[in-house]
């Protein structure tokens, strides 16, 4: 069975199950799901066509229905998880386009009372794989309930549930501030922190890594994280991560350990701790030894870790010395010999992964080229190029092969991968141009024909893409081709002095009108590096006599106008209207009404049969009757499909409206949370102001007391002046009191200045409060506007329901017409019986016509069989469209 037929059968089974959730329909749907899982149709399912999209949407709806059996839901989840695991684009489509994450979260929410169910564990495992290295939309359905479920069940007695909850929580928390804020706002967050800290002593390393990853995401910049990842504990964390990376018992644990270290290195303090780690050189040599692993996923993750380590200058220099100038083995004699052999010559392993085939993992060769670029940047800065020349010669032999012209007949995905790898190779060669000796080596092995052929082919392909249909994939591929073309031209400009042929080809390409497309696309790009490359190429090309500057200006203006129009359309259009229009385009309504001439032919045939006709034309008229009924049946089928399309469009519009309402509620909840946070900050500020005001009052009272004391002392001093013999003794005391007064007066001035500053701060906070009130009023106005839009949508839904009622009346009238036709058929049957009797009478008189009579009877029997088949089809259509009883279908079959 081909893929198209299998998908049509699957869609029919989904519709039958939605109309009637019986055990038979469920078993049929499960059988079709198993058939689809046996086919390699992932590329067709996620191609964006109408039939696969309907199948996926139907499967999502059936799986998300709480009334669906667990066995059927598990089969659907297994099928979709199989496609997500085999193809990265399928995983992205399930996550972003079909909201598979929200569906799984809703299933978990519906079964939250029975977390030990196998279906819940299956959903958690699939969610963990689906959300790895993918950001989840915070406004997706049931995400808050999912987070609460995970926080509640991390202390479950089932180890599988605990591991799945921790892994999924680590994915959700990583690089998602909204999820982190939601977790921190929960009332049981402290208990959750304590549970995570208790997991650090777990006997399963995977659980430990999950707990560390969650804690680093939530508490790295807080007091808990500073205590957890301080100088005393961080070395144990480093040892744990390197042990798991080198001796991990699975790819999953190694991936999370590498991600944890990559996240920790973004903190400057932890990066400094790592540079002081005493076992760092040994760990790095063992990590480099993993490059000899035959598993491309492991090698890719190790290279990702090495690229992240290169972000720290000290570590980059150490890695560069280890790879480009490997020292003697630094392991202790008691270590394993296998590790020593594994850590030898990591540079050769890098060469192997750089030249890995295109149909392998894309991240593998891209990470290898990124790592080589980082290492040679450090080598050029540290003057290590002389010791790496032999390695560069070996590397250039393999790398320059990757710049060969791609085959224009290969698919878009392979061409895109080839262009991305070629762009990264050109970046690496541009880095080598920073050293004179390495530049000379590259110029000796790089031929102008390689660069020219690649640029020519990519320019032709970009021209074809610009003339074809404007789709997202074409636009992305055109961007990639443009980037590679300009980088190749920049590489040619570096070698045009050493290679005369390169200079002539370089200036010839710059005067080609096809260069306008990559220049205009790159100059209007949002990437600063690409714009700078385009400007450098433009600076070289502008003085040339035949450079198409006018065409370039027009192309840039057209790109800017297209971007502006696209942004305006994206702002104006709503998702609901887009979905409805998509459904309308995907399901064109077919009007196949029978014409008036057909009705007249039916009446004329009935009249002729009633009055009696010649026997030799009866077969022709019978075929005409069958054709007429076939036209009737096709018209009814078209009407049924039209009604089904309208119902599906209505259901999609309603689901989109529900999603909009959920998004609005999420945004409103976020705004209210921010308002509560600002209100709490305002209360804290007012409380601090009151404390400072009380302290200021205390200081003022103290100053008043000091003034009264000084006044009393002055009066006492005046009295003492009358006594001459005591004047000298009291003079010192007076001077001391006077100095105390001066100090008190200075303190008074300082407190007055502090009072003024606090008054200004209070005024600023008051203005901020007024601004927040205005913002709240605007938000309330927007809420009222959204409610008005919802009312309009409800009116549209009511109008569509009235249209559906009218269409149902039309269907009833058609059924009455069919009933009349059946009565006419019965009359015709009676007339045929009379004719049969007359033929029997005449056969007695004319024996010569006996053979002709038998032939006519055989033909009549065939016609009756065909008529019964068509009648059976009419009964099936009636049962599908209007749900007639089984007895009516039997009555029609008897005709």
Image: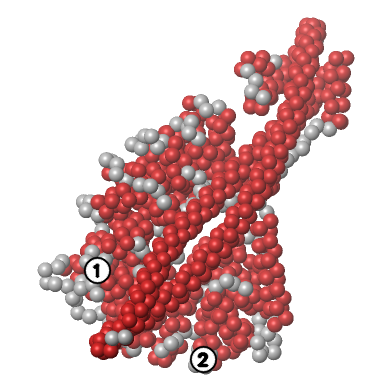
Asked whether residue 459 appears in the rendered view, the answer is: no
> What percent of the width, then of the height, locates residue 596?
86, 30
Sequence order check: which comes first, mark 2 or mark 1? 1
Q: Residue at coordinates 47% horizontally, 78% vertically from top-left?
A: 427
Query: Could you say which quadrant of the image residue 627 lies in?
Result: top right
> What percent of the width, then of the height, locates residue 668?
55, 50
- Relative depth, front residue between 568 and 234: 234
**Rendered position, 739 above or below 246:** below
Mark 2 lies on a secondary structure that is loop
Of circles 2 and 1, the one toward us is: 1
> What percent of the width, then of the height, locates residue 218?
37, 58
Q: Quadrant of the C terminus?
A: top right
Q: Residue at coordinates 56% horizontally, 80% vertically from top-left?
A: 532
Query: Could you say which quadrant of the image residue 158 lies in?
Result: top left
From the viewer's perspective, tell me whether residue 829 is left or right of residue 275: right
Q: Residue at coordinates 59% horizontally, 45% vertically from top-left?
A: 661
- Relative depth, front residue between 298 and 571: 571
**Rendered position, 135 above or below 552:** above
Most extreme residue toward the left is 334
**Rendered position, 786 above or below 439:** above
> Label 1, on which residue?
231
Local crowd size for mark 1, using a 10 Å CA cut-off: few (<14), some (14–19), many (≥20): some
Q: Residue at coordinates 42% horizontally, 91% vertically from top-left?
A: 436
From the viewer's perspective, tell me whether residue 850 is left or right of residue 161: right
- Relative depth, front residue between 881 and 263: 263
Q: CA distance from mark 2 to mark 1?
A: 55 Å
Local crowd size for mark 2, using a 10 Å CA cut-off: few (<14), some (14–19), many (≥20): some
Point out which mark residue 499 bears: 2
């Amino acid at each position: 069975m081909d893929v198209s037929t299998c998908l049509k059968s699957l869609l029919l089974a989904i519709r039958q199950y939605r109309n009637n959730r019986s055990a038979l329909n469920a078993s049929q749907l499960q059988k079709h799901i198993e058939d689809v899982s046996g086919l390699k149709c992932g590329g067709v399912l996620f191609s964006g066509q109408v039939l696969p999209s309907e199948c996926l949407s139907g499967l999502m709806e059936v799986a998300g229905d709480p009334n669906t059996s667990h066995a059927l839901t598990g089969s659907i989840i297994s099928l979709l998880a199989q496609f997500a695991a085999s193809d990265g684009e399928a995983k992205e489509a399930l996550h972003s386009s079909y909201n598979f994450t929200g569906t799984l979260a809703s299933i978990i929410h519906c079964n939250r009372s029975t977390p030990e169910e196998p279906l819940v564990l299956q959903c958690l495992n699939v969610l963990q794989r689906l959300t790895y290295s993918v950001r989840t939309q915070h406004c997706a359905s049931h995400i808050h309930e999912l987070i609460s479920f995970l926080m509640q069940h991390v202390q479950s007695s089932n180890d599988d549930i605990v591991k799945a909850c921790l892994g999924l929580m680590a994915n959700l928390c990583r690089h998602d501030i909204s999820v982190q804020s939601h977790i921190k706002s929960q009332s049981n967050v402290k208990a959750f922190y304590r549970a995570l800290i208790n997991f650090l002593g777990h006997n399963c390393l995977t659980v430990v890594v999950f707990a560390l990853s969650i804690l680093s995401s939530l508490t790295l910049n807080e007091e808990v994280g500073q205590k957890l990842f301080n100088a005393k504990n961080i070395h144990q964390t480093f040892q744990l991560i390197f042990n798991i990376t080198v001796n991990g018992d699975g790819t999953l644990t190694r991936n999370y350990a590498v991600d944890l270290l990559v996240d920790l290195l973004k903190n400057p303090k932890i990066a400094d701790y790592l540079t002081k780690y005493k076992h760092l050189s040994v760990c790095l040599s063992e990590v480099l030894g993993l490059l000899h692993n035959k598993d491309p996923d492991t090698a890719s993750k190790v290279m990702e870790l090495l690229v992240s380590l290169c972000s720290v200058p000290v570590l980059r220099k150490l890695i560069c010395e280890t790879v480009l100038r490997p020292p003697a083995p630094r392991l202790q004699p008691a270590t394993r010999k296998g590790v020593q052999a594994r850590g030898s010559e990591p540079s050769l392993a890098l060469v192997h992964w750089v030249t890995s085939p295109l149909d392998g993992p894309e991240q593998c060769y891209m990470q290898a080229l990124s790592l080589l670029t980082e290492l040679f940047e450090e080598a050029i800065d540290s003057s290590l190029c002389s010791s790496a020349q032999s390695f560069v010669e070996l590397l250039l032999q393999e790398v320059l092969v990757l710049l060969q012209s791609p085959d224009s007949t290969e698919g878009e995905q392979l061409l895109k991968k080839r262009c991305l790898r070629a762009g990264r190779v050109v970046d690496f060669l541009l880095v080598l141009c920073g050293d004179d000796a390495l530049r000379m080596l590259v110029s000796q092995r790089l031929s102008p024909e390689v660069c020219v052929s690649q640029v020519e082919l990519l320019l032709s392909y970009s021209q074809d893409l610009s003339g074809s249909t404007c789709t997202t994939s074409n636009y992305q591929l055109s961007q990639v081709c443009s980037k590679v073309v300009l980088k190749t031209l920049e590489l040619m400009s570096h070698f045009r002095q050493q290679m005369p042929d390169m200079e002539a080809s370089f200036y010839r390409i710059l005067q080609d009108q096809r260069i306008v497309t990559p220049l205009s696309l790159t100059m209007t790009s949002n990437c600063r590096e690409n714009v700078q490359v385009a400007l450098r190429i433009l600076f070289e090309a502008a003085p040339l006599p035949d450079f198409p500057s006018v065409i370039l200006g027009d192309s840039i203006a057209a790109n800017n106008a297209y971007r502006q129009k696209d942004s305006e359309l994206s702002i104006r259009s709503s998702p609901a209207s887009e979905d409805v229009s998509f459904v309308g385009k995907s399901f064109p309504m077919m009007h196949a009404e029978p014409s008036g001439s057909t009705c007249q032919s039916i009446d004329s045939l009935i009249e002729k049969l009633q009055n009696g006709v010649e026997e030799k034309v009866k077969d022709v008229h019978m075929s005409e009757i069958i054709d007429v009924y076939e036209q009737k049946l096709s018209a009814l089928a078209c009407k049924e499909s039209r009604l089904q399309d309208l119902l599906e469009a209505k259901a999609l519009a309603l689901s989109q409206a529900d999603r909009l309402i959920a998004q609005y509620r999420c945004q409103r909840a976020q705004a209210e949370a921010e308002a509560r946070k600002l209100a709490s900050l305002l209360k804290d500020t007012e409380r601090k102001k009151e404390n400072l005001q009380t302290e200021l009052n205390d200081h003022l009272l103290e100053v008043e007391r000091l003034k009264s004391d000084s006044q009393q002392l002055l009066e006492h001093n005046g009295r003492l002046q009358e006594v001459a013999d005591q004047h000298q003794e009291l003079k010192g005391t007076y001077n001391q009191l006077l100095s105390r007064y001066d100090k008190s007066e200075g303190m008074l001035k300082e407190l007055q200045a502090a009072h003024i500053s606090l008054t200004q701060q209070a005024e600023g906070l008051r203005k901020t409060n007024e601004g927040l009130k205005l913002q709240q009023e605007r938000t309330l106005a927007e809420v009222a506007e959204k409610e008005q839009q919802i009312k309009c949508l409800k009116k549209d839904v009511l109008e569509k329901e009235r249209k559906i009622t009218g269409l149902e009346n039309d269907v009833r009238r058609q059924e009455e017409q069919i009933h009349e036709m059946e009565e006419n058929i019965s009359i015709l049957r009676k007339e045929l019986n009379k004719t049969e009797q007359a033929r029997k009478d005449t056969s007695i008189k004319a024996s010569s016509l006996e053979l002709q009579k038998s032939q006519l009877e055989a033909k009549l029997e065939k016609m009756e069989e065909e008529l019964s088949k068509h009648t059976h089809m009419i009964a099936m259509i009636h049962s599908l469209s209007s749900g007639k009883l089984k007895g009516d279908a039997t009555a029609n079959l008897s005709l």
